[in-house]
Image (cartoon, rainbow, N blue to C red):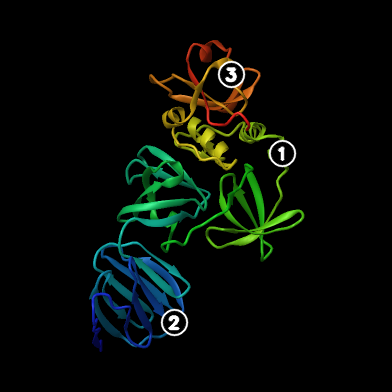
């Protein structure tokens, strides 16, 4: 027989509310915490039709029903091998070991879990691809709809779109920091347990300890391991480093909205190359053009950006100048080198921009 237990919340700012011997509930400023004691959680999943979270557990629980009806929670129900949590309405949540965090308000912080996380114009994978998140990158969740999240990307000038909720991990407020990003197209990290993990260029990480030939790092998902030191391209100058970074992506296929080594669009390439060299620039071509200093073609230096009017008026295509009248860009055929003297590009040149100082 199911027992009914009512929780008494003394004030609206109550810090803790106890729901019996199996769980404690804490109401924080912007999220709710459920700590399950002496219960091993095997699986967590949303109910297909209700605003409910279902936890499958290994323990054999005594059935009971806890009435909360405060902020995120309405009820917490214990059954033989599962726990059901009825929410006041659809909310984002994540499980860390035996602690469940339920977010109460927007915006919320999250990081990308997969090497490539696409953001779409609509909550539909057949809609236009707006941009992508690199694994470990931060986004701000603005709203949710069923199993979709609408997110802004601060590193891309708040570029926004819809992504699948299983492709990101929510973070607690203030629980995100990193010191650097991977500065090569691909780097192999050796984790502490000896396994190997491929990291794409632009992946953020924190530096734990620098050794003679390798650096101990921590990824934004908490994974720790070692990466080899990169060849000191920056000692040859930032402009040289930008060019060499861009060359690493030669042959990568074109992908509208792409920002990773698996596929790039024109402004995604320039954005990623600059990001990998610790320089933040806007994600899209027109903002990149507007954020730089206009220069003449004769004053171009390696690492500067060249813009063209192609499929529409204005700066609709961008490439990175590499010297000798050539530039690297993501064309429909993929990332390639072209010449400013080619007839097609010469008559479509819109302008040249530098984002660097004279000493770079």
First of labels 2, 1 by sequence position: 2
Query: Dot 2 surroundings within 10 Å: few (below 14), some, or many (20 or more)?
Result: some
Res 47 quadrant in image: bottom left
Residue 168: mark = none
Q: Which residue is mark 2?
A: 39
Instruction: State how far apart marks 2 and 3 are (Cα).
Output: 67 Å
Q: Position of residue 317 (x, y in %)?
A: 47, 24
Residue appearing at x 55%, y 63% in the figure: 222
Of badges 2 and 1, nearer the viewer stands 1
Q: Which residue is mark 1?
A: 235
Q: Position of residue 318 (x, y in %)?
A: 50, 26
Q: Which residue is mark 3?
A: 299
Q: Quadrant of the C terminus?
A: top right
Residue appearing at x 71%, y 49% in the figure: 229
Residue projecting furthest to the right = 212
Instruction: State how far apart marks 2 and 1 are (Cα).
Output: 54 Å
Residue 299 drawn above or below residue 260: above
């Amino acid at each position: 027989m199911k027992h009914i237990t009512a929780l008494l919340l003394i004030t609206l700012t109550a810090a803790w509310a106890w729901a019996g011997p199996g769980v404690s509930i804490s109401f924080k400023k912007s999220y709710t915490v459920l700590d399950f004691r002496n219960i091993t959680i095997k699986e967590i999943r949303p109910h297909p039709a209700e605003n409910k979270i279902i936890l499958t557990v290994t323990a054999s629980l005594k059935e009971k029903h806890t009435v909360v009806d405060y902020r995120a929670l309405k009820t917490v129900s214990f059954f033989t091998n599962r726990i059901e949590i009825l929410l006041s309405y659809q909310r984002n949540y994540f499980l860390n070991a035996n602690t469940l965090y339920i977010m109460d308000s927007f915006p919320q912080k999250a990081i990308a879990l997969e090497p490539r996380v696409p953001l779409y114009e609509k909550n539909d994978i057949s809609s236009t691809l707006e941009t992508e998140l690199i694994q470990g990158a931060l986004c701000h969740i603005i709203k949710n709809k069923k199993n979709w999240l609408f997110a802004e990307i601060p590193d891309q000038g708040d570029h926004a779109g819809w992504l699948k909720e299983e492709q990101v991990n929510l973070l607690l407020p203030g629980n995100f920091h990193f010191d650097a990003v991977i500065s090569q197209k691909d780097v192999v990290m050796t984790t502490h347990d000896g396994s190997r993990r491929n990291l794409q260029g632009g992946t953020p990480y924190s530096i734990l300890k620098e050794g003679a030939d390798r650096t101990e790092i921590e990824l934004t998902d908490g994974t720790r391991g070692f990466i080899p030191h990169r060849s000191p391209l920056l000692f040859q100058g930032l402009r040289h480093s930008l060019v060499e970074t861009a060359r690493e992506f030669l042959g990568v296929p074109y992908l509208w909205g792409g920002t990773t080594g698996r596929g790039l669009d024109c402004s995604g390439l320039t954005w990623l190359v600059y990001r990998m060299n610790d320089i933040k620039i806007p994600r899209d071509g027109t903002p990149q053009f507007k954020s730089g200093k206009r220069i003449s073609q004769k004053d171009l230096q390696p690492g500067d950006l060249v813009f063209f009017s192609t499929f529409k008026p204005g700066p609709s295509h961008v490439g990175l100048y590499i010297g000798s009248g050539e530039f690297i860009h993501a064309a429909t055929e993929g990332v390639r080198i072209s010449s400013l003297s080619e007839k097609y590009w010469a008559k479509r040149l819109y302008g040249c921009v530098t984002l660097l100082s004279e000493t770079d």
